[in-house]
Amino acid sequence: MIKPGGPLHLLRVASPVGRLELISDGRAIVSVTIERDGRLPQDALPDDPDELLDRAAAQLAEYFAGARRRFDIPVETGGTAFQRAVWQQLAELDWGAVTTYGALGRGTGHASAGRAVGRAIGANPVPILIPCHRVLGSDGRVTGYSAGDGIPTKLALLELEGIVLAPPALLPAATEQGAGVPAA
């Protein structure tokens, strides 16, 4: 146990996109943070892993090695009903597949909810495990990413999964309407 008021169990692991901070409540993974500018939120605390964090670290290592395409560890996201609906759609995306903000909005029954979808994606507490990096603008452009170092982290994750993006000169001029995130 870490400390009262802090995470219950904590483990930091190296990855190709920077250090990852994994937090477990003992039943599920509740947070994955990709370091930004060399820092993680709980850097001052010592690692205190549990069996679940060890499993998560092993599965993430397999993912980064190209040997795992789905995670089978429990996650607890919290969030609103709308956020959970967006995250559920993301969790169902296959490795190497992409979707758009608009498609996710339509999947929740709110076709014009692009901005709310963008906010839900940005609030995802377990990136990579719930693959929010697989969301592109309607024109195929890479848009914002709130984890790690932003768009460079998103591009690295897409590349890891073999997702090849068209060069910007070949993309249509239209932008994702309502995504809430500027096009790259």
Image: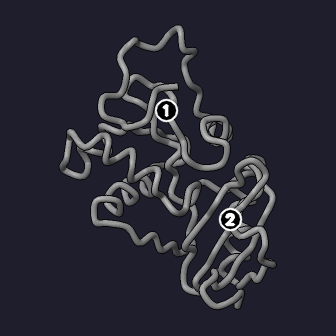
Mark identifier at residue 63: none
Q: Quadrant of residue 103?
A: top left
**Along the line of sight, the residue nearer the viewer: 176 or 180:** 180
Q: Secondary structure at mark 1?
A: loop
Report the colour scheme: one colour
Q: Quadrant of residue 52?
A: bottom right
Between disc 1 and disc 2, whose residue precedes?
2
Judge from the rendering whether residue 138 lies leftward or rightward of residue 143; answer left or right.
Answer: left
Q: Is residue 183 visible?
A: yes
Nearer the observer: mark 1 or 2; the answer is 2
Q: Residue at x 43, y 50 (%)?
A: 121
Residue 137 location (% of width, % of height) = 41, 30
**Along the line of sight, the residue nearer the viewer: 54 or 118:** 118
Mark identifier at residue 41: 2
Real-space Cα separation, disc 1 to disc 2, in angstroms: 24 Å
Residue 39 location (% of width, % of height) = 75, 56
Residue 36 location (% of width, % of height) = 70, 50
Looking at the rendered structure, the kind of residue marked 2 is: Pro
